[in-house]
Amino acid sequence: MKTKLMLLLLTIAVCGISLIMLRDWATLSPLKREESVNMLSQAVIDEQQAVYLIADSKKTLQKIDADGRLVYSVSSKLDSSSTNTFLFNDVTTDSQGNAYVLITVLDQYGLKVSGEHILKISRNGRQKTMLYTALASEDDNLMRVGRIQSLQVVGTELHFFSRSRQSASLQSISTSNQLQQFPTHLASFELPSDRYLKEVTGITPTIMTTKQGYLYLVQEDQLQQLFPNNDEPTLHFPIEVEIEIGGKQHIYYIDAHEAAIKRLIPQDNGATIENVVTLQQLSQAREDIDWQSLNHVSLQGEQIVVTALGAVAVLNPAGELQTVVAGYTYSMNQLAMRVLFWLIVVGLALLTAYTVRYIYVVMLQRKLYLLLKQLLLVIPLLAASMTWLSYTVYHSVSEENKKDTFNQLKILAANGKYLIDGDMLQQINSPRDYRGSAYATIKEQLNEVFPRSRSDHDGLYNTIYRYMNGQIYVVMDDDDSVTMFQPIEPTESDKLVIERGTVELGELSDETGNWLFALGPIYNSSGELVGIYETGKDMVAITSSNIALLHDIIKIVLWISLVLGIVITIMTIYFLSSIRKLRRSVNQIAGGEWDIEVEIRTRDEIEELGERFNMMATAIKNYVLEVTRLSSAYFRFVPQQFLKVLGKSNMSDVELGEQQTKHMTILVCNMRRFHELSATMSTKDNFAFINSLLKQLGPVIREHGGFISRYLGPGMLTMFPNHTNYAIRAAFHLRLSLNSYNAQRAQQGLPPIELGIAIDAGDVMLGIIGEEQRLEGSVISNQVQLTLDLERLSEQLGVSVLLTAQARNALELARAEHCRHLGWIQLPASKEPVQLYDWYEADEPHIRQLKIETKKVFEKAIDDYRSGRFYDAREGFVYVVKRNRYDLAAKLYFFASDQFYQEGTQPDWNTALRIS
């Protein structure tokens, strides 16, 4: 059971680990072959025409091959345990299909930059190498974008710019180095003191754009202003600049005001600007795609790659649409991985269901500790309750946090008209006003409430929009990547603020992330609407706060569950202690300790159960004592060994007719000339004498593993289930015990008595005979009757212990020396003669010595007798009798030899000595 459970749990663990390893393939639609791109911010194409997309609001890098198949999808999250936000902000490629990405690390609120990483991703997306890391300090006050820009691969080097407010330095690192490295400084570029750098790209030449909307060409340390041609205020300015070096220097950029991709061609007297494509033209060419906005432009050879929010357009130099990437397909391997993920999910669900069933149906039906059973029942209920409580609390608190956030934003947005001077805002009319007096005044007003250097800004961001000529423009934003006077397509919330002057709340998703926001109107001193104030929070901050809340809830719930589990366990152990007392007492009773009394003072049903147990224990004790007395009485009549031979443990199991055949040794011992002694005693004295003799002899039989089958007056028929040697040893000790008994009789002035002992071995049948109301154990065997006859014969032969050949063969070598062959004896009741032996080790010492001295002559005479040499036999027996006048066997053989010598043998003579 334990092995099976461990295998199930191990399999579940393997499935869980597999799901973690395959988590990137998790999807609700594993069989879906096609997928749309989503929330694009940048796209580039390599030499193999593979497209690299920064998608999902800068959270994912996707590579799509020339056939439209997804090669890989990589998350920007470098550290899954971190609360920081990780965003892809740039991507480039090399000729081998490796990608180089810039990952910007933001704080937990998704606003302030804490570091930047340059990561190399192999062509199949499986290997990731960190090439460079740059940390940002609190004083840098970098918001949403860091210092690194414009990744470009040149040979085996990766070039990039590190920018400050008015300058940039070109640096490089090796693309082949597998370790993080310090960059090599290549060049530096400076802007005029009243210009503020926004974007820098290209190497030779280099293009720089400013926050005021200027575009400069840096070539041979010369700074040339290409856009605009003059310093007149204008709403047109270049963003997302890309430069092509060919026969001519073509500079491509996005004109956010016109929502168009433009091409700037430097000339000696300025620059020529051409339209490449507009957002409207793309929408007309492919009406099935929701282009929404232009976000990035890049170049690959003569191809122009335009990134919109919902698709990527590839144009030729004439601006004609060649290819559109609006989605991708999965390869069969990727589909297989997605299906495999769900197969493992289904398998895990089935395994979990089976394991739960096994635990709660199969295991609980088996013998388990009560504490374990209770924990198996309580812990899941407790876990389910705590999970439901956690979800309820989390959902309730997170919703409340969201409401509180909206209320906070609403108050801030409503106070925007007081925080921001509308007359000052009205003076800002173009990007040229960046960091002008009006801009500085408004910025100072905001910093008094929301200083950028504060670490406790709680993730709030601020954006100020200028409303003029029916259009909304970004004027000021905490995001350093935003350029002044980028036009904004009015949302329904914007329209309500403009039309009604109300504070509006909402949620927004774009290429930069997901946001909660509040909008409030900004008026000038004449009461005219001149702008909109927006404040909000990145959903990253709210999600991070909710995750932190969830972690706190889980910790609290785990502590509560742990405390409850400990309390339940302690209570269960306390209650089980009384039950364990009862169990120990039961085990003691089962072990034969009857004087048991359990003490329980719980003042409940268990105490009452203890009292009933004590009553039961007393009753059992009395009953067992009675049964023990009865069993002891039974064993006086039926030996316990007799029951064991029958395979029974007590008398109640015995039934009429049950029998067993077994090879056993039979020993019969009986007092000789008992009738002569009995005639001299009264009946009472007879019984007293018989009992005293049997009391002397009975223990000897039991000590040697035998049991008494029945009594023969002053003798007994005994059986030995073990080896015959045990019976022979018992015979020896019976003779010693008799000597002791005769010594006691001599002290009382009584004559000694003599025992005859006969031993045989063979198969005997033990069984139950009688009728239903009267049963008796009996032994039935020819060997039993033969042994009884041999015991009577032993007196005629003058032998103390008479053995058959089967018994003699079991004699130990040392004891066999005191054994002589008696030849074959023909009993009156037997058809076949019996080969007998005289074992005289237990005889009186002088008799034993005489038999030892005459043994060879006696056995030689036996051989002569059997061979028919009766004269030689008679002479041999005469010699024995002369030496040992107590040898009755020699006398019997002498008379038979003499008769046969004088008269000859009968025709039926079988060489055996006949004894009547």
Image (tube, rainbow, N blue to C red):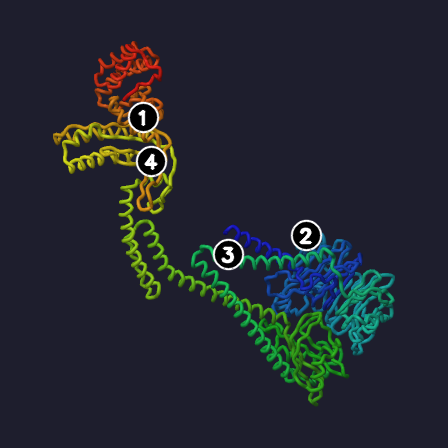
Q: CA distance from mark 2 to mark 3?
A: 55 Å
Viewer-nearest residue: 750 or 442: 750
Q: Position of residue 465 (x, y in %)?
A: 71, 79
- CA neighbours of label 2 inside 10 A, class few (<14), some (14 to 19), many (20+): few
Q: Which residue is mark 1?
A: 829
Viewer-nearest residue: 522 or 447: 522
Q: Which residue is mark 4?
A: 779
* Comes first in the chain, label 1 or label 4: 4
Q: Is residue 218 left or right of residue 344?
A: right
Q: Is residue 220 left or right of residue 659?
A: right
User: At numbered mark 2, what does the secondary structure look like: helix, strand or loop?
Assistant: loop
* Comes first in the chain, label 4 or label 3: 3
* Residue at the bottom extreme of this rendering: 526
* Comes first in the chain, label 2 or label 4: 2
Residue at horizontal 77%, vertical 69%?
308
- Nearer mark to the viewer, of 2 and 3: 3
Pointer 2 with pointer 4, Cβ within 8 A: no
Q: Which residue is mark 2?
A: 178
Q: CA distance from mark 1 to mark 4?
A: 19 Å
Q: Is residue 629 left or right of residue 423?
A: left
Three-letter amino acid code at disc 4? Val
Q: Which residue is mark 3?
A: 362
Q: Which mark is residue 484?
A: none
- Nearer mark to the viewer, of 3 and 1: 1
Three-letter amino acid code at disc 3? Val
Q: How many marks?
A: 4
User: At numbered mark 3, what does the secondary structure look like: helix, strand or loop?
Assistant: helix
Q: Quadrant of residue 759?
A: top left
- CA neighbours of label 3 inside 10 A, class few (<14), some (14 to 19), many (20+): few
Three-letter amino acid code at disc 1? Ala
- Nearer mark to the viewer, of 1 and 2: 1
Q: CA distance from mark 4 to mark 3?
A: 52 Å
